[in-house]
Image (cartoon, rainbow, N blue to C red):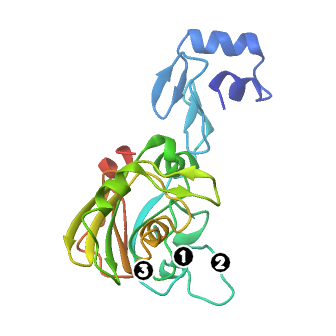
Amino acid sequence: MRLDRFLANLPQYNRQQVRLLLAQRRVRVDGQAVDDPRCEVRVFSHVQVDGQVLQTGEPARYLMLHKPAGCVSATRDPEHTTVLDLLPPALREGLHIAGRLDYNTTGLLLLTNDGQWSRRLTQPRTKQPKTYLVHTEDEIGTHYVARFREGFHFAFEDLTTLPAQLDILGPREARLVIVEGRYHQVKRMFGQFDNKVVALHREQMGAIRLDPGLAPGAYRELDATEIASV
Ligand code: URA
């Protein structure tokens, strides 16, 4: 919400007082004096006027988890272990997954309570690269590379995938960088060649790499640089 609306919604200020408070730079958002009425106030923002706290701000949380195979990317599931079950109960509250992985896919999974942050990371229009290590049942031909670059038509959504970069690492192994996260996207791309993906591991999202120190099932908080990179 805009700062001027946030302040005017409070019982103690009318619009004219809000304009004055801003003009006199008496409002601080996250410690910074602000005079721009359009400054965005979020549930995470700390807001004060003349040193009096109007909103303390919820802590924003950002975690990376090394997702093991055999658990679902959901916050709840009646049958299977979920990725949230791998976190201590006190940490789970309010978290959602920024870019799901399939049941048997392993690797980097990001969890947060910050919806804007996760949208910036996952929406195709922001073109944040996601890097996967792929193992396939059959050999990966050199002709795949151009096809991945050109894009595949996905009939169900009636869309053509954005250019993807495929680096062939071995007869049945490749590294793939895509900028979208369509449903089963990597498996469906290889499916266009009738080549089954037998193992899939996400190494990186945007500038955030899976920490090599994290064993499958382990997690850590993101550092400030990782959070700011999105
Ligand atoms: N593409 C897939 O097919 N599966 C995943 O888990 C991630 C990307």
Q: Is residue 56 left or right of residue 217?
A: right
Q: How far across and how far down the image is residue 147, in percent?
A: 37, 56
Q: How far across and how far down the image is residue 103, in percent?
A: 51, 81
**Real-space Cα distance between discs 2 and 3?**
28 Å
Q: Is residue 130 left or right of residue 74?
A: left
The residue depicted at 29 percent of the width and 58 percent of the height is 145
Tell me where residue 198 sits by quadrant. Answer: bottom left
Between label 3 and label 1, give the one nearer the viewer: 3
**Residue position for label 1:** 84
**Residue position for label 2:** 76
Identify the secondary structure beneath mark 3: loop
Q: Inspect this view and state whether residue 58 appears.
A: no
Whether residues under marks 2 and 1 lie with C-beta atoms below 8 angstroms apart, the answer is yes
Q: Amino acid at mark 3?
A: Lys
Work out which residue is located at the far left of the displayed protein and give it: 170
Identify the secondary structure beneath mark 2: loop
Query: Looking at the image, is mark 3 or mark 1 earlier in the sequence?
Result: 1
The answer to whether mark 1 is within 8 Å of ligand 1 is no
**Residue position for label 3:** 196
Q: Amino acid at mark 2?
A: Arg
